């Protein structure tokens, strides 16, 4: 019998329904695989039955999300779920076997979410390239729009028509001038927005304390100071972005 493997993206809210369906159907839970991405943590749940492998991926899980544990149906997943908590910082609720973040007892909190300076530089370069491409795509729209008539150009056109038609022609040209000015201003604003660098969202004090609480007590002061410094920097960057609007 040939092996069949399928991949399906699902929402976090659908996880329990999928797991219940697989459990009722006699499927075996194989693994939970985590991957660090730009949008957050992707989780892939793999089930197997009769040489068929079904993979369900939940994309972009963040610190604010709560992932339900599947250990009530599949106790065999306890090492995978604890690993996801320890190495990726995912909030998994209701684990029957919960190691409290000490399955590995790693020296660095959430080590699999840490990227090297080289990777960060590559990601920043890719973001800038994407922003430049977006700005380049928007600019032609502004350049291709008709140039609004000046008041002098309008009056010159009005003077060329019969006196009894001048008021009507002037009103029509003024209306077109206004419409062209608004369209050009909108296109220029879109181009300027596309050129702006992405501004990081500053962490809240509550988010900082949640991260601090997850590390060993002897490291908390150092981690808090580092996160506070980043928060201050991100707030300054966000404010600078607002001032430039």
Image (tube, rainbow, N blue to C red):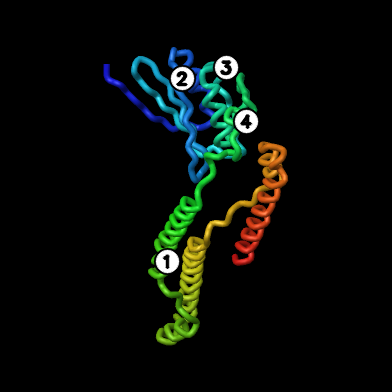
Gap between marks 2 and 3, in whole Å?
Answer: 12 Å
Q: Residue at x 45, y 83 (%)?
A: 153
Disc 4 and disc 3 in contact, CB within 8 angstroms: no
Gap between marks 2 and 1, in whole Å?
Answer: 51 Å
Residue at numbered disc 1: 139
SS for tag 3? loop
SS for tag 1? helix
The number of discs equals 4
Task: Please report whichever mark, 4 or 3, sits nearer to the chain's N-terminal start.
Answer: 3
SS for tag 2? strand
Which of the labelled discs sits on residue 29, or is there none?
Answer: 2
Residue at numbered disc 3: 72
x, y percent for residue 203: 65, 48
Task: Please report whichever mark, 1 or 4, sits nearer to the chain's N-terminal start.
Answer: 4
Asked if residue 163 can be seen in this view, the reply is no
Q: Nearer the viewer, residue 186 or 95?
A: 95
Residue ranking furthest to the left: 1
């Amino acid at each position: 019998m040939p092996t069949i493997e399928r991949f399906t993206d699902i929402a976090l809210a659908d996880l329990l329904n999928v797991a219940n369906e697989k459990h009722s159907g006699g499927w075996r839970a194989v693994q939970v695989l985590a991957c660090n991405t730009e949008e957050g943590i992707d989780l892939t749940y793999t089930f197997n039955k009769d040489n068929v492998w079904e993979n369900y991926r939940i994309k972009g899980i963040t610190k604010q999300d709560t992932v339900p544990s599947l250990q009530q149906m599949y106790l065999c997943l306890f090492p995978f779920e604890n690993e996801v908590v320890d190495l990726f910082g995912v909030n998994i609720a209701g684990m029957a076997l919960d190691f409290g973040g000490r399955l590995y007892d790693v020296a660095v909190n959430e080590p699999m979410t840490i990227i090297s300076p080289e990777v960060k530089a590559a990601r920043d370069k890719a973001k800038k390239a994407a922003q430049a491409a977006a700005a380049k795509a928007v600019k032609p729209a502004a350049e291709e729009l008709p140039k609004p008539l000046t008041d002098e150009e309008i009056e010159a056109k009005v003077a060329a028509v019969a006196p009894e038609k001048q008021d009507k022609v002037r009103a029509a040209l003024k209306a077109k001038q206004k419409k062209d000015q608004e369209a050009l201003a909108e296109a220029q604003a879109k181009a300027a927005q596309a050129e702006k660098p992405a501004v990081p969202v500053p962490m809240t004090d509550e988010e900082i304390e949640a991260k601090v609480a997850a590390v060993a007590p002897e490291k908390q002061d150092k981690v808090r100071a580092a996160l506070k410094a980043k928060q201050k920097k991100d707030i300054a960057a966000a404010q600078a972005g607002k001032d430039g609007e």
